[in-house]
Amino acid sequence: MRFEEVIGQVAAKERLLEAHRSGRVSHAQLLSGPQGSQGLPLALAFAQYLCCARPEASDSCGQCPSCKKYQKMVHPDLHFVFPVVKTPSLKNPVSKDFLPRWREFVLDEPRHTLARWLSKLANENKQGGIFAQEAEEIIKTLNLKTYESEYKVMVVWLPELMNPSAANKLLKVLEEPPPKTLFLLVSQEPEQLLQTILSRVQHTRLPKLDDASLGRALGERHQVGPGQLDYLLRVADGDYVKALEALDSARASSEDFRNFSEWMRMCYGVKVPEVMAWVEEMASIGREGQKQFLLYALRMVRESFALNLAPAHHGQLVHLAQEEMAFAQRFAPFIRGSNVAQIAAELDLAHTHIERNAANKIVLLDLSLKMMRCLKT
């Protein structure tokens, strides 16, 4: 990965580059920041830069043999430590046992979160950790000579998940590292690390991503238009992961929005035959789809009520995509203090009934008739 592929974090990039230019690259670096702040991509970009055969002033060349191996994460002097899970066949797991899946996760998945990684391991219900035997592997690996590069690089992702035994053994390596060894620790909760570890690393704190950098990445990488961009930036609050999750949600909810807006127009107009046809259509999408729709409807009601209460501050209070906002501005006057609690209660009750396998057509028709009355209240 090259620095140009890392979203934002201009100051952190310059600090790392300056350390290299001045010949003061600390053997142990800690990059810490909130979720979505690009800690892991930044660590990989710095490692690739240090090992590049033809580095440029502000980035690796991307073309030399070392860079090409780094871009596939198969360089022989690049090593990883990350949370793993115990399985029936792996009682004492270490990172190298999961390395092929780790490479797929990092290269193919822009959302580098613990939950997604554990899901990749098909053990999302288990708690991941870095166990004592991992420290033994670190020592064994770093005692080997470098194969191709000047540095042996050890990237440790989420070191706060090391158990006490692993943390204490890592501390000993940090105190007396092998020559030309570079540790890059990427943390989201550095306060969970041992103070003795913190005292032995050069700490670079990563802030939330700025809106300009995040917006540019969303536009270029995910084809987000200007209308949707403002909404995503408000929801993300500098978190690339949140921005992508909100984008996924917006795309998934487009059909829910169509159903909701048509349903509300029919209910307000007391168009019973059209509502009955809508119920037939909704009954065909399955219970999970119906439950998702009802949760979406609850969100739209909440957002519309907030818009009705404080229209001048909707930018801070209401998080809706452009199409949803256009509808909500017309719909909000009908969601008032006199009916919002009843509407929300009816939607919640319908969700419960669907979840408990009640006859969905009866539930949806009964809900629709109640909505007709509530919207007139």
Image (cartoon, grey):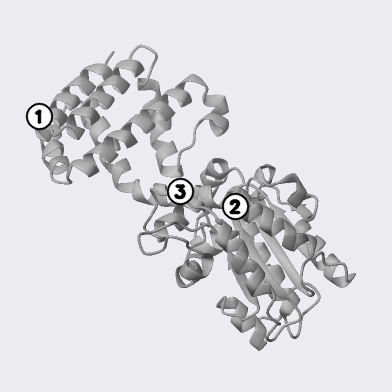
Distance CA(mark 3)–CA(mark 1) = 42 Å
**Residue under pointer 1:** 362
Tag 2: Cα neighbours inside 10 Å, few (<14), some, or many (≥20)?
Answer: many
Tag 1: Cα neighbours inside 10 Å, few (<14), some, or many (≥20)?
Answer: few
Q: Is residue 263 left or right of residue 189?
A: left
- Mark 2 and mark 3 residues within 8 Å of each other at the beta carbon: no
Image coords of residue 156 (percent x, y): 63, 61
Q: Please report the residue visible at 12 percent of the width from the left and 31 percent of the height from the top.
A: 358
**Residue under pointer 2:** 162
Residue type highlighted by circle 2: Met
Q: Earlier in the sequence, mark 2 or mark 3?
A: 3
**Residue under pointer 3:** 127
- Secondary structure type for disc 1: helix
The quarter holding residue 20 reads bottom right
Residue type highlighted by circle 1: Ile
Tell me: residue 292, above or below residue 200.
above
Q: Please report the residue visible at 78 percent of the width from the left and 75 percent of the height from the top.
A: 180
Q: Earlier in the sequence, mark 2 or mark 1?
A: 2
Q: Nearer the viewer, residue 82 or 53?
A: 82
2 vs 1, front mark:
2
Q: Please report the residue visible at 26 percent of the width from the left and 40 percent of the height from the top.
A: 259
